[in-house]
Amino acid sequence: MRAEIIAVGSELLTPYKIDTNSLYLTEKLMEVGIKVAYKTVVGDNREDLYKAIKDASRRVPIIILTGGLGPTEDDITREVVANFLKKELILKEEILEKIKRHFEVRGIKMPEINIRQAFVIEGALVMENNVGTAPGLWIDEEKIKIALLPGPPKELKPMVENVLIKELQKYGSYHYFSRTMRIVGLTESETEEKIEDIISGLKNPWINILAIPGQIEINILARGKNSVAEAEDRVNEVFEKIAERLKEHIFTYGKEKLEEVVGKLLRERGKTLSIAESCTGGYLAHRITDIPGSSEYFERGVVTYSNEAKIEILGVNKETIENHGAVSKETALEMVTGIKKISGTDYAIAITGIAGPSGGTKEKPVGTVYIALSTPEETSAFRYRFIGDREKIKWQSTQQALYLLWKSLKNG
Amino acid sequence: MRAEIIAVGSELLTPYKIDTNSLYLTEKLMEVGIKVAYKTVVGDNREDLYKAIKDASRRVPIIILTGGLGPTEDDITREVVANFLKKELILKEEILEKIKRHFEVRGIKMPEINIRQAFVIEGALVMENNVGTAPGLWIDEEKIKIALLPGPPKELKPMVENVLIKELQKYGSYHYFSRTMRIVGLTESETEEKIEDIISGLKNPWINILAIPGQIEINILARGKNSVAEAEDRVNEVFEKIAERLKEHIFTYGKEKLEEVVGKLLRERGKTLSIAESCTGGYLAHRITDIPGSSEYFERGVVTYSNEAKIEILGVNKETIENHGAVSKETALEMVTGIKKISGTDYAIAITGIAGPSGGTKEKPVGTVYIALSTPEETSAFRYRFIGDREKIKWQSTQQALYLLWKSLKNG
């Protein structure tokens, strides 16, 4: 069986907000073998919503509605669905009590309008809301199945996982399986070239490549008619081939970030890290310290934006900057040696470059970045040329620095 | 007249990708007075797309389709629309020539399959594509108006701005106007409380509040029946009232980031800044240096994650840390004095706290953060308690630090 997701809310029809619940719902539906065939967004308007539900009911047998279950007059989903199904709305005392208690424990009397949330479509299964006030509803008729879910993700997710998914499981016609890998150190076209002959023309499994500069994510998704094992086999066959081709560059078979993987390796080996940044302005230290427990391996960082800071904190020679420039291999090497010396860490990274939009020259155009890595064995620096705006150049510089560190940790 | 946006593409029905073209299109349609009533996503499937177009045509008089104009067999939008309108697809020699040239200048022979992109629905206005190969189409029938646009934003946008918007202008029934403000230093509920009596029950203008911890954006949008001026008046009346109430907290009447506004003030006043971070791990320096030209006012930053780093680089007293802890008002004050001294800047900020998830105590739970600000006039430190995960605590700490600096610059 296939489904349509309908997000209800006028704010989702403005230039300001987008429906993202449908991504989560798609994933959950897929897990029980239900394919999303349509996604619709409609405003808080009775006539429009009625038409959306009617059209959806002609297209698919399962409709998942999100939003419009609040207590105000604009919250019309319950009424419109009841109207569409020609069913009554019935006040449920036990829900009303629960809503009242929700306010009581917060020391507030329940506002009158919240009574609306205690009305239930006759025959519907009630999905309890333990976070907010609006319960969800599940209507399972022979011809049409409709779920009503609240809009806020933290209210919607528990209902899906605790109740809805079990109901939907009965109607999954396929079995899905997917695997993921993330790659660093290759461009999108380099990646595609390496695996073109494997993935070309594939329909099941289905390959999805998500590329941002400095990182590629490959998702492999397959459908099995009779079992998950069938889908799994299809995925694995292609997955192994791709993994073999790209193995030098795969840093995770999950959704981990590169800084997470690097952090794990540093911790496992009991090694420490320090960082000296110029053009990335603290971004690398920020990424490293986003990982819980990073204080175990990250000792310190400096953002030596001015030449004086490079000289005073890191002991870079004034002559090195004068002769080679602040953006040079020589300066990067002195920066990395300096930060390693003052911090006493096992590993150190230094980054200096031109993030733009101004400051570029013919010899060193915007995007020119030197990255130096010092390991317990050796110290070296590399020149790169990154493309994009200031933010993209900063991001790619930190990603490349993490890549160098990851390679060294992995092979060391 | 109202419109429906239909995004075509099976990848938009996976958990990995979302349609964002519709946000841009909604904004453009609004500018010419056309309201988006529905948004639909459908896969690369002839039958499904046919139904989506048919249902849309019964709901609204204008349909904007994006995607499915590529050269492969999966690109079905042209054919399905032609089929729906019972019209022929005609090969246009001049388009074919243009596509051939597109490949020629890149030194490639046009692949055979690209011929499909030179087929045009009879009677359609062709919207040239100067970026890619697929032209857009605009069909203006009495009963239904349909636009076919390519999926990639950089191909779609010029077509909309150069051609489509002029065609749509004829059918706009309303005039829209909107204004924005961004607020710092108030929570969402504090903001709502302050302006509740102004905004309660408003329908035109319409208020949209986008809140993230540490920042609130208020969008005010109005519709005028006869002129933009009418809409503008409606917006301004409410806008002025809200601005009066919140004036102490409004840092921009546009879409600027707080670090941008702070950077502008530092530059205008010829003042410099240095930063010492512990729990934010470089995030504040990263935000400051994301702004082009920040090297004019940002001198240096340090990420003194370990106690040794705080003592060695910033000259924090060992006893201060021993007696009061690394997360304390006293340490924050010594950090800010230290960074200001070694950098010689006019302003300095220091942040030390517990970003979690571990490291909290009863007296100093996770989310406890001390921020010290040193201005040319005075040095002071404040204690905060932020709620959320590690990333949210880091974000709110940097936002609060920027808020303190902004207040001081604004009033100084």
Image (spheres, coloured by chain):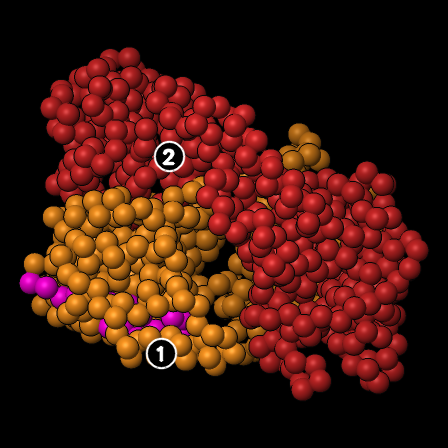
Chain colours: A red, B orange
Instruction: Residue at 37% x, 26% y: name it.
Output: A173
* Quadrant of residue B174 within the rendered picture: bottom left
* Picture residue at 69% right of the left edge, 58% below the top: A185
Image spot of residue A370 (x, y percent): 75, 70
Image height of A88 relative to B164, above or below: above
**Hey, what amino acid is under mark 1?**
Lys
Q: Identify the residue at horizontal 77%, vertical 57% (top origin).
A: A404
> Between residues B394 and B138, which one lies in front from this camera angle?
B138
Q: CA distance from mark 2 to mark 1?
A: 39 Å
Say whether residue B108 is visible.
Answer: yes
Query: Which percent across, then down, holds residue A373?
Result: 82, 61
Q: Which numbered tag is attached to residue A35?
A: 2
Mark number displayed over residue B98: 1
Q: What segment carries the magenta color? A: B126-142
Please state which amino acid type lies under the numbered disc 2: Lys
Q: Which mark is residue A126?
A: none
